[in-house]
Image (spheres, helix red, strand yellow):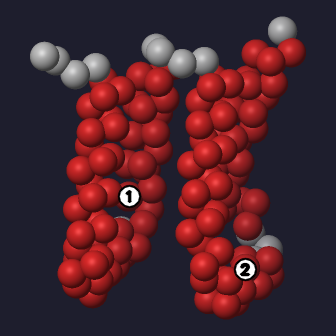
Amino acid sequence: MGYTPIEWIALIFIIISLLKIIILVINKNFWINKVSKRIIKHGHSIAFIMLVLALIVLYFLLKELTIVQIIAASVFGILLVGFGMLQYTKELSPLIKKIQKDPHILKRSWIYILIWVIILLWGLKEILM
C-alpha cells in the first residue's frame, strides 16, 4: 500500500521525533553536539531549507485541508512548543531582553512576519467569505 504525501510527512516527522527522544534519553550531549550545535552553526542555510520545506508541506496540506484547518492545527503545535519552552523561563528571560533591545528585530524578522501576515489574512478571508 502506498502512502499519501501527508502520511509520508507525518511518518518522517514521527521517525525523527522518536529518534530524537531516544537519543536525548540515552545521551543528550550527543544530540546537542552533533545536531543542535550544527544547526545553529549553519543557521541561515538551515533556515532557508526549513522555509522551503515549510512551503512544500503547505502545498501538500492544502491538497487535503483548508487554510483554516491548517491554522487551527498550527495553534495546537504552537501551544505544545510554547508549553515545552516555558519550562525554561529562567533561561529564556535574558534572550527576551536581548531581543527586546535589538533595534533591527523587524528588519531581521520581516520575511517571517510577512509569511504569518499572509497566512493570517488568508485564513481570515476564508472564515469571513
Relative to the observer, which residue lies in front, 18 or 125? 18
Q: Which residue is mark 2?
A: 96
Q: Which residue is mark 1?
A: 46
Q: Position of residue 64 (x, y in %)?
A: 47, 15
Q: What residue is at 63 percent from the left and 63 percent from the top?
A: 82
Q: Which quadrant of the structure image shows residue 85?
A: bottom right
Q: Position of residue 30 (x, y in %)?
A: 22, 82
- Above or below residue 21? Residue 124 is above
Q: What residue is at 74 percent from the left and 69 percent from the top?
A: 104
Q: What residue is at 32 percent from the left and 46 percent from the top?
A: 13
Q: Position of residue 89 (x, y in %)?
A: 67, 83
In this rendering, would 6 be left or right of 16? right
As drawn, which residue projects farthest toward the left?
1
Q: Comparing marks 1 and 2, which lies closer to the viewer?
A: 2
Q: Is residue 111 visible?
A: no
Q: Report helix, strand or loop for mark 1.
A: helix
Q: Report helix, strand or loop for mark 2.
A: helix
